[in-house]
Image (cartoon, helix red, strand yellow):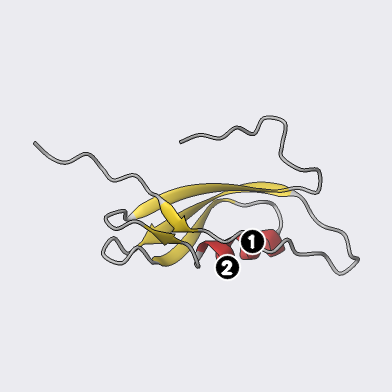
Amino acid sequence: MADPPAHAIAYYAPKPEYPTLPDGSRPEGSGMFVLHINPKTGLVKYVTVEKSTGFAILDRAAIDSYKQWRFNHGVPIAKCPITFTTHGLPSDWKFEQ
C-alpha cells in the first residue's frame, strides 16, 4: 500500500512586504501561487502564478516572499493563496488546515 501524499507544512514563512505605488497608495488584490519545492531539501525552487493579484508589483512581492519559505521534506508542490488589502482580513477569510 502506497503512503498518502505528504501535506505541505511551512516551518519558515515570512510575510511579504506590502509595496506602495509611485503615488503612495497601496494596491489591493488576491491571487494564487504555486510553489515548486525540492522534496529533499524543502527549499522553494521557483514560484508560478496560477492567478495574478491584478498588480505586477503585488505578484512580485508574493513571489519574493514565497521563495524564502521552507517546507517539511517530501513535498514537491504547494498552492498558496494571498490577499493584499489595506482593510485587514477579507470578510470571507477563514483558517483551513
> Residue at horizontal 29%, vertical 58%?
73
Task: Decide: is 2 above or below 91.
Answer: below
User: Which residue is located at x 56 percent, y 35 percent?
Assistant: 95
Label 2 sits on residue? 64
Element at label 1: loop
Instruction: Find disc 1 in the rendering and name its residue.
Output: 16
- Residue 37, image x and y in percent? 36, 61
- At label 1, the amino acid type is Pro
Q: Residue at x 76, y 47 (%)?
A: 85
**Left or right: 95, with 97 as reference point:** right
Gap between marks 1 and 2 measured at Cα: 7 Å
Q: Is residue 37 left or right of residue 65?
A: left
Amino acid on which disc 2 is placed: Asp
Query: What residue do we see at 91% from left, 66% from top?
Result: 23
**Spot occupied by residue 30 in the image (x, y as percentages of width and height):** 66, 46
Indicate left or right for 58 with 46 as reference: right
Total labels: the figure holds 2
